[in-house]
Amino acid sequence: MSILLIFENKNPDPWYKLLKEKLPGGTIEVYPDVKDASLVDFIVCWKPKKDIFNKYPNVKVVQSVGASIDHITNSQTLQPNTVVTRIVDTKLTQDMWEFLVAVVLGELKNTSLYMAQQKEKKWKQHRYASFKDVTVTILGLGSIGGYVAQNFSDFGFKVKGWSNSKKQLSGVTSFHGKEGFKDCLRDTNFLINLLPLTKDTRDILNADILGSLATSAFLINVGRGEHLVEEDLLQLLNSSRLSGALLDVFREEPLPEKHPFWEHGKIKITPHVASLTNIESAAEQVIENYRNFLNKKTLVNVVSLKKGY
Ligand code: NDP
């Protein structure tokens, strides 16, 4: 029995150190240094390279070290009974809320505009909207989106949210399913995408959907790059149908140097940092799951492979 860490674009060393310390008797290896591939039964991973799991025929559990699992389901063919788990962490959720409120308040209070004016020594005042007159719509009311929606509501914004199943969140007008989607988008000033990437949500941020928002709405994509149809966004920004976008996630990461987003005046880019996994608290969940696995107990934060999240 052994745990194998497979990390791309992420340093496995602190994870290895922590797991080794907390599971002193366990065999923990870091890809590609594996003694016996047949003994690997628990993979801990981030963005594994295509079909890499095929080398390990006896894997029973795959643990994502992030909130999402699309990096696994899009790159691997999983054995029918493999259990896939993810991280659900209050710190991750809180950090996401803090990031999003900073973005929305910055936009509402024109901070970028004033910084640009300062460079030109230009003294020009602009009016701002009050929270109570601004509609923030959250796509995805899961462990992160639900919390974010309630907090925006507590601040006094008008808040709408969209999910697969109906939700009851105080202060949040909730819509669900395909039939509720367009109503949810109407009058939206800030659209925040917190959906998981699945076959149903890929390319969901397209011209039709983004064109249903209020005029001059602002898009914040912290879900996944593949949610967004990039050409559609550029077109809507260039025609001033949308006022701007903050993008934290991209189809290709790091965003290629020649990508048109880098120099677009209405696009703000952050390098997939809206909320970063906290190694200490996430490792606790990995350890709990490994112990549960060894003791044949139910694992925590298991995802539905059928739903894709
Ligand atoms: P959850 O799985 O807890 O929630 C997903 C939500 O999306 C649920 O409310 C679900 O509905 C809804 N949903 C899924 N598919 C559909 C659909 N087809 N139509 C309508 N609603 C749908 O995920 P989390 O809140 O933990 O995380 C959400 C995403 O945030 C992650 O998948 C990841 O992509 C992103 N993320 C980004 C980070 C960053 O730094 N940029 C950091 C962390 C997460 P229901 O509740 O009915 O099932």
Image (cartoon, rainbow, N blue to C red):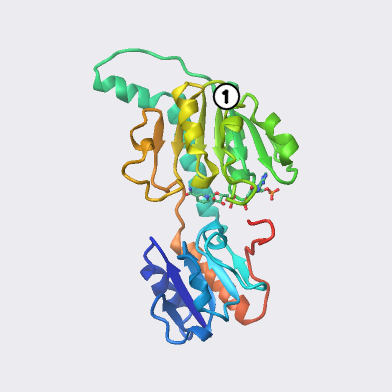
Q: The disc labelled 1 sits on which kind of residue?
A: Val
Give x and y (percent) for residue 200: 65, 47
Residue at x-position 55% and y-position 25%: 131
Relative horizontal placement of residue 88, taking residue 12 as reference (left or right): right
In this view, 34 is above or below 178:
below
Task: Kindly state the secondary structure of the residue where label 1 is placed.
Answer: loop
Residue highlighted by disc 1 = 134
Looking at the image, how many numbered discs can be counted on the residues?
Answer: 1
Residue 224 visible (yes or no): no
Relative horizontal placement of residue 91, taking residue 60 as reference (left or right): left
Foreground pick, 155 / 230? 230
In this view, 79 is above or below 167:
below
Q: Quadrant of the N terminus?
A: bottom right
Give x and y (percent) for residue 226: 52, 46
Q: Residue furthest top?
A: 124
Foreground pick, 256 / 87? 256
